[in-house]
Image (tube, rainbow, N blue to C red):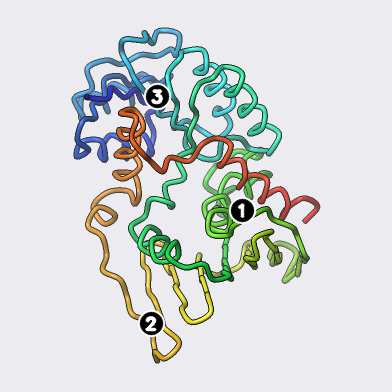
Amino acid sequence: MVIKLGIIGSGYMAREYLRAAKIVKDVEITTLISRNKLTAKSLAKEFAVPMVLNRIDDIKFSQVDVLVICVSETSTLEVVAECLSLGVPLLVEKPLGLTLSEALLLEHRAFTSSIPVFVALNRRFYASTLCVMRELDELSSKRYVHVVDQEDTIAAKAAGVSQRVVENWSFANSIHIIDYISFLCRGEPKLLSKDRIDLSSQAFIVKAEIEFSLGDFASYMCYWNAPAGWRVDINVEDTAWQLAPLENARRRELQDRKYVDYSLDVLDLEYKPGLVRLLEDVVKFMNGNSHSLVSIVEGNRTMRLIEMIYSDA
């Protein structure tokens, strides 16, 4: 069964989905929807998309089986709400909302409309992440997860990012790294402590410690407007894993003197990491097979965690 995809948006992420879809079996991009007629027509010509629409209202049920929504952060709420009336499953680029309340509103609307909505948390589909998760899933050991984040709102403002997005940057961008805590740690989270350390008038560090009901523990540290790099460390009793950068995984046993690197995955080198496997799971879902797509409910678990860490931070 060939799955007909429609893509809403014509920016960077739309292009990356179009590239990835080219090599996914049983996927066909049939429709591109964008308010920007010029870029939409250009993309459609480059990737041989047969239909270009300028309005969501013009989508016919027969034209698409699934809609991929990759619009700006400020448009996501409005676009997803409108698409819920179309009766087809949605795959939505994160963040689902610029606030927790926006994300929960869409969760409620998805529930009442009975439309499956998935959040495109593509880092869960990195080969590096999947390798580590397969090994962790074989263990019952308590996990300690340490995440290092780095965010630069000064650069975001200079790049022309809207003020509203910058004001909610923890939801707009930190979601990429905080999500690791959400899916690596088991049980319900409880905030043990959080702190803010000011380095200057613009640079500061946010620290948080979180305990989970099934015994796992996480620590989070974010360098705001200060140099650092994204990193995830996972420890159990006798084994440690590290993702740094996130596309690269390494493992170290207690007796080892250094980490052993995993092989890099060609799909994550040639395409935006995680997207090919993400689209493959869309096909699995549509064919009624087991998949790892992130439901809106599961995605909002991460949004709640962000709110827990950053409320009043």
Residue at position x 56%, y 42% in the image:
298
Q: Which mark is residue 259?
A: 2
**Which residue matches tag 3?**
67
Q: Quadrant of residue 52?
A: top left
What percent of the width, then of the height, locates residue 99? 68, 38
Disc 1 crowd, CA 10 A, few/some/many (<14, 14-19, 20+): many
Disc 2 crowd, CA 10 A, few/some/many (<14, 14-19, 20+): some
Residue at position x 40%, y 29% in the image:
68
Residues under labels 2 and 1: Cα distance? 33 Å
Look at the image and tell me in which quarter the N terminus lies: top left
**Along the line of sight, the residue nearer the viewer: 236 or 167:** 236
**Along the line of sight, the residue nearer the viewer: 147 or 186:** 186
Left or right: 102 with respect to 283? right
Residues under labels 1 and 3: Cα distance? 31 Å
What percent of the width, then of the height, locates residue 281? 34, 39
What percent of the width, then of the height, locates residue 266? 22, 57
* Residue 90 visible in this rendered orientation of the protein: yes
Give SS at disc 1. Answer: helix
Marks 1 and 3 in Cβ contact (< 8 Å): no
Marks 2 and 1 in Cβ contact (< 8 Å): no
Q: Amino acid at mark 2?
A: Tyr
User: Which callout, 2 or 1, points at the residue further toward the start of the chain?
Assistant: 1
User: Which callout, 1 or 3, points at the residue further toward the start of the chain?
Assistant: 3
Disc 3 crowd, CA 10 A, few/some/many (<14, 14-19, 20+): many
**Which residue matches tag 1?**
153
Q: Which mark is residue 310?
A: none
**Along the line of sight, the residue nearer the viewer: 243 or 98:** 243
Residues under labels 2 and 3: Cα distance? 41 Å
